[in-house]
Amino acid sequence: MSKYNVKPNLSVNFAGIQSSNPFWLASAPTTNTGEQIMRAFDAGWGGAVWKTMGARVTNTSSRYSSINWNGQRMMGFSNIELISDRALEVNLRELAEVKKRYPKQTLIASLMVESTREAWHNVVQQAEDAGADGLELNFGCPHGMSERGMGSAVGQVPEYTEMITAWVKEKARTPVIVKLTPNITDIREVARAAKRGGADALAAINTINSITGIDLDTLIPQPDVDGRSSHGGYSGPAVKPIALNMVQQVMSDPEAMLPISGIGGIATWKDAAEFVLLGSGTVQVCTAVMQQGYRIVEDMIEGLENWMCEKGFHSIEDFRGLSLPKMTEWKDLNLNYKVVAHIDEAKCIGCGLCYTACWDGAHQCIHVDRVSGQVDGPIELHAKPSDVKAASRSNISVTPIPKLDGYLARQPYVTPLARVPRVDETECVGCNLCSLVCPVDACITMVEVKTHLPAETWEERSAACLTGESC
Amino acid sequence: MQELLQQKPEIAERFGDLHPPFEAQAAVVESNRCLNCFDAPCTIACPTHIDVPKFIKKIASGNLHGAALGILDANVLGASCARVCPVEVLCEGACVMHGSNEHPIEIGRLQRYAMDSFHAKGGKLPRKSDENRTEKIACIGAGPASLSTAAELQQRGFQVTVFDKRPSAGGLNTYGIAEYKLPLTESLDEIELIKDLGVEFRLGVEICGETWLAELEAEFDMIFIGVGLGAMHRLSIPGESHPGVIDALQFIEDYKTGKISQVEGDVVVVGAGNTAIDAANAAKRLGAKSVSILYRRTREHISAFDFEYRQALQEGVHFLWLTQLMAIHSSAIGITSVECLRMEIDSDGSLKPVEGSTSHMECNMVIPAIGQSPLLELLDQCREVQLERGRVVVNRATGQTTNPKYFAGGDCVNGGREVVDAVADGKRAGVEIARLLESAYV
């Protein structure tokens, strides 16, 4: 296919930082040492944000916990790990070495020091002297460091964020990225403060305050540190929707908008594409690598390239932010648009999940009376789910025995019509729940119903109400 | 009870599980695959209507005890049914996953997982009523149907006594099911639970004769007949009385109870039902040089389930179609050969022998498995209990016979089906007996 002939260009210029692709390792255990980062670069990562450097710390044991869901491990991941527990000099020496060996790869120094102008000036100078392509200010670490007046203690107060960003900008020769904490009422407040302070870029989000769970045998919350625990920072696939929302909020706010590095639950090329569509210039990955290693980047690059080819995008800039205009506030949505659910009886496997969901979680407009013919009208009386169930349970079933019962013409791949639910379109509000719970791809689709009414938002409608028109 | 039956360790070893149990992680993954259907087809397909999605979702959440109680509430022999049910044609056969080209949920193994955990933790059957009632019910036969009735009634506070002519309870569960499906010890453990409820077992007692029945009627308020079927049909051919001819059920019982632990030479099994296949597989596992199944008709006509047939092929059993056994020859050392006749099927479906097609094959042991005959002697003596073609006539929904004091269920009613069918029959009868006795006082 001709559209695959030209390989798209994944390289990016992020706030003046060049990177061969938008996939960066986030500041984390995966970027703890020079040796690790070189292996990551060998695997294909475009950049790495060095695990936050600062005054040495002591970590606890243990320090991670996770949420498993439906047999799948690490849907959500939490840590109470602090910044690098290695000496600053060691990290900087290794950083210089890595930069020398991998000049084309991007190295960002993540920094966190005590909140004085001098301390920040010092560390900025040292990091840049070592060869960092940019600086990332860690204003987000939610535990351990915040008690010391650093990390989220800075990131949660716009005035501090602005002040320290300004201190760093006084000294910095490379681009300054401010990493935002999500543990705040409105992330735009801090983003604006960072911009006022002179930041060149933003990174969002850091981890979310969390308690992943409690061991029901010992009653100790996780992770267990000698019988006690502490809130951790939440990451992994579970946080992606929260991160996407925060990135969109920042990128839709003129006072906050800056180049942004998207972080939060990115594990595949699809996740990355979504962050870019909401305006991210690069993406940072941590939890997925902690779970599966550096090798995941191979599929991330290839998957993104293939998707870009299909869509006709030649560079990251071609699609960056394309979804932003499609986000509005609720008040601007068209109230006269209507869809209803449609069940494809050829695909339906008769599990009845849509029926249960519609009766208990929606508007009781899916019925199991298909074979009794159409039942339409404003008020319908249907057998309750419990009655339907009771009727089946009172059946007498026996084991079919070929010799006694003959070969039953059972066709396991066809669902009898009696088990295929029916949508009453006059009652369906088009909420989408059934199509979400349906386990079969494209079996339940939402079909547009022409209302023949002009598009009208809530704002327009309430304005009309005020002028005395009907509403 | 258990000391009566001592199983040889080498038998247990040779008859390893046909379907090995789940590991914990695998059980959770598999149970999460279950869609939790509304009015689930698997539940409808199960004769005892176990609420399958409900117990599976409890396994997923780690509520194994709840899962087991849910199974037991519907089917008191949930542990053995988990192992012996032909799930391919029941719950798993009905699974909607077939519709999306996926493997059905492994319901049988999940049920076993929940029940194994229940047994391992020393779970007890719960009572369904705190009341202690004085009415007494007799169950004749200690197979699955009677055990189900007995448990249902005892759980509701009635006094139940189970009679059986054998030294151990369980009927076919204990004596007649292939060891790789249901190990003897599992069946006995399950019966212990029912015993623990307070059900009285009078074993080694043969109910026969009108005086016996009269005494039972005098002592008990209701009588449940769960006697199953009687002796296996005879071949009625020359040489059949040789001691090397042993019917399939006896053969299975003998290796399960340790009477035989080895088979030598060539074995011929006659018939192609599920029991024939169990016997053939067993002969193979016990060391037979060759095992051949002789069947008068063809592959399409066998009464064994398809998966049983395929299992036998895997075990190395040969099938000889359109073959009729005519005679068994023996010498002083034992059976030497069998004489067979080739058959053909006419266009109208009738069987007829092919002229001059007699052949001989070497054979050292013959195992007939051509079905069981009804226990007419006993059944005929039950007053006013109507029979039809050797089967007890009952109201299917209640198990009540034409004599309102007598109920019946299991093989003696349905002519020979699965354990789960007997359990379902027994349960329906138990529920109805309780309803009748309770309403008598209203």
Image (cartoon, coloured by chain):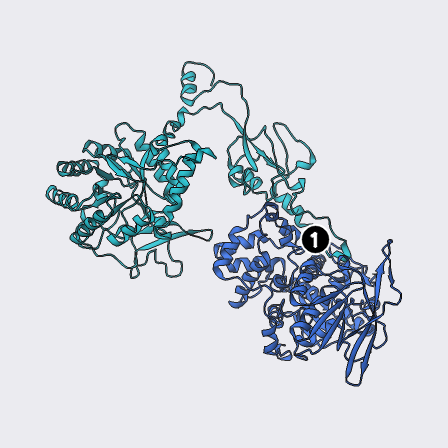
| Colour used to depict chain B in the structure image | blue
Element under disc 1 = loop
Count residues near mark 1 (Cα–Cα under 10 Å), then give few for <14, some for 14-19, many for 20+: some
Rendered residue at 46%/33% (across/down) = A2
Give the side of residue A246 with respect to residue B26, left or right: left
Q: Chain of mark 1?
A: A
Q: Which chain does the cyan colour mark?
A: A
Q: Could you tell me residue A77's position as x and y percent?
A: 36, 50
Q: Give the camera-side residue of B419 and A139.
A: A139
Identified by mark 1, the residue type is: Ser
Q: Which one is nearer the viewer's eye here, A248 or B187?
A: A248
Q: Position of residue A162 (x, y in %)?
A: 18, 35
The residue nearer to you, when weighing A158 against A447, is: A447
Res. A468 in view = yes
Can residue A270 be seen here? The reply is no
How many marks the image carries: the answer is 1
Rendered view: B362 above or below A55: below
> Which residue is labeled 1 in the image?
A397
**Image: B62 above or below A153:** below
Question: In the rendering, at what x and y percent does residue A101 appear?
Answer: 23, 49
Residue A346 pos. (x, y %) = 63, 38
Is B194 situated above or below A419?
Answer: below
Image-based side of A320 in relation to B398, left or right:
left
